[in-house]
Amino acid sequence: MVAYYYIRLRMDINGKYFKSYLEREDAFKKQYNAERIKKQHSKGKLTAHERIALLFDAGTFEEIDAYVTPLDLGVDFGKVEKSYGDGVVTGHGKIDGRLVFAFAQDFTIMGGSLGIVHARKIAKVQEMALKMGAPFIGINDSGGARIQEGIASLSGYAIIFNNIIQSSGIIPQISVVMGPAAGGAVYSPALTDWVFMTSNTSYMFVTGPNVVKEVLNEEISSEDLGGAEVHARKSGVANMIYDDEENTIIAVRKLLSYLPSNNLENPPVAAPENDTPGVNERLRDIVPDDPNKAYDVRDVVNLIADRNSFFETSELFAANIVTGFCRMEGKTIGIVANQPKVLAGVLDIDSSTKGARFIRFCDAFNIPILTLEDVPGFLPGKDQEHAGIIRHGAKLLFAYAEATVPRITVILRKAYGGAYIVMNSRGLGGDFNYAWPSAEIAVMGPDGAVAILYRRELAEAKDPAAMKKELVKKYRDKVANPFIADEKGYIDEVIDPAMTRMKVLSAFSALSNKSVKVPSRKHGNMPL
Ligand code: HXC
């Protein structure tokens, strides 16, 4: 207070202080002139300040370090614009009333390139977010390391990467890519928990089209090399993509609404949807009688979860497994579900890694997991074996078994072989395992089992097709039958599908004080 009056006094006595304050504010405003803004808008992009305004609750964002200027490194190569803020907006504000820290790179200033001051600004808010236990959001729109600053900018990236890694599993970290992210700079988003991209205006690649041309003599556009579609469908780097920046930012806010601010808190509880029936007979008709017929497992999720609460993550990547957050009586639940509609819900490399990463996120942030299982097994073949399905499938096993949050499985239909074990089976530490009457649980599918056990008999049979049909039926009735698993205690109960929500709610309620003591160790050694 004393300091405040002292400053005011000095301003009043000597007008020059007040004048320079206003002049600086004026220069700051001029920096973001109409021409710069127009240039950014002409690329279909919003400015850093506009993005921040959309992201935070109105009027809550406090910018810090707005007046810092780039460091003069005394290097005579290219010009460094003496801008305020050094090409990045940083600060804190509220999202749905909760504290969040963020940066937004400003492409209008030296292409949003990252110099050491720019990096220090980001590092400062990262470190504050960690100390305060608040989520961190980075909006990326940058030409990467500032060429003029050489090693100083590289070291800036190293500090940022290190901060992300130190905060991992402590605060949720979200990256939003709304422009270029090229070279090693891509690892800043890649290290965070969630990556959002906007279609047509954002791209990420370690080496750009020019290098690809030079080294491999291949022509490829930025969009085809590392656009939003590519990363959402093929590489899995982008978890969510949207057509424009406004919808991208709305989705970021929505995702945050499911998450706790840090690993010591529970996720926020929304007002419960009282109109979701605990007993829903429509669930009895979802799984077709013919085991070879597909259905959309998201229909099951939507009938179990609070109405309209399902937020699917990584929807376009490895669609044979569905992951996402929903709410049950207002509480956040992580969903992992095999998707019979895509590749019959088989587990392959991509679906294993997608599932594993999702489970680890839920476990880090106290989000209980509901697994809906209908999986014929692992995808066979040379491509998968040679690309390491053993190593990658092991990640899913590892992630489930190390997760200490409440874990419930409902077997809807197929649960065969290693895939049965992987999908949160009882032996792997699943807390409650239920099965629908349509469940088929066994070492392998009926066709494979009959072919192995009755090879000779089938070869000698007069009518092998009829014999096989009969044996398959017998196998389904006598072996792959959920009531047998129930009687032997491998599952907790065969339930009426209509009662699933009620059963799951009751089980999660019983697990609400679950506490698991893990023996002290530095960390497990997940097969990466
Ligand atoms: C300094 C840069 C810059 C950079 C862009 N600019 N990238 N300045 N360092 N890395 C400047 C441009 O000189 C230009 O300044 C302004 O930003 C806008 O750039 P344009 O090229 O006019 O824009 P556009 O045509 O939209 O192209 C954007 C771009 C291109 C594709 C990003 O600028 C580009 O290819 N930049 C280099 C990308 C790159 O390879 N970065 C290094 C990656 S390696 P004026 O004054 O004309 O407005 C890296 C290492 C990280 O980042 C290591 C981490 C471990």
Image (spheres, rainbow, N blue to C red):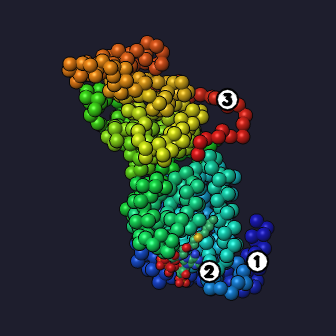
Q: Residue 9 carries which label?
A: 1
The disc labelled 3 sits on which kind of residue?
A: Lys
Q: Where is residue 80 in the image (x, y as percent from the top left)?
A: 63, 83
Observer able to see residue 498: no
Q: Nearer the viewer, mark 3 or mark 1?
A: 3
Kind of residue sitting beneath label 2: Ser
Query: What label sits on residue 130 in the rendered view?
Result: none
Q: Work out whether 191 lies above or below 441.
A: below
Which is more N-terminal, label 2 or label 1? 1
Q: Nearer the viewer, mark 1 or mark 2?
A: 2
What's the distance in space between the residues labelled 3 and 2, CA to CA?
53 Å
Q: CB at mark 1 closer than 8 A to ligand 1? A: no
Secondary structure of the residue carrying numbered label 2: loop
Position of the C terminus, as image quadrant, is: top right
Give the structural element (helix, strand or loop) at label 3. loop
Q: Is residue 78 left or right of residue 282?
A: right
Residue 369 lies, with reference to residue 357, above or below; the image says above
User: In the rendered image, which residue does mark 3 sit on?
Assistant: 517
- The secondary element bearing badge 1 is classed as helix
Q: Which of 212 and 62 is in front in this view?
A: 212
Q: Label 1 is placed on what type of residue?
A: Leu
Q: In whole angstroms, how far apart are the C-alphas of marks 3 and 1?
A: 60 Å
The residue drawn where x is 61% and y is 72% is 145
Residue annotated with mark 2: 83
Q: Residue at x 32, y 40 (%)?
A: 341
- The answer to whether 459 is drawn above or below residue 80 in the figure is above
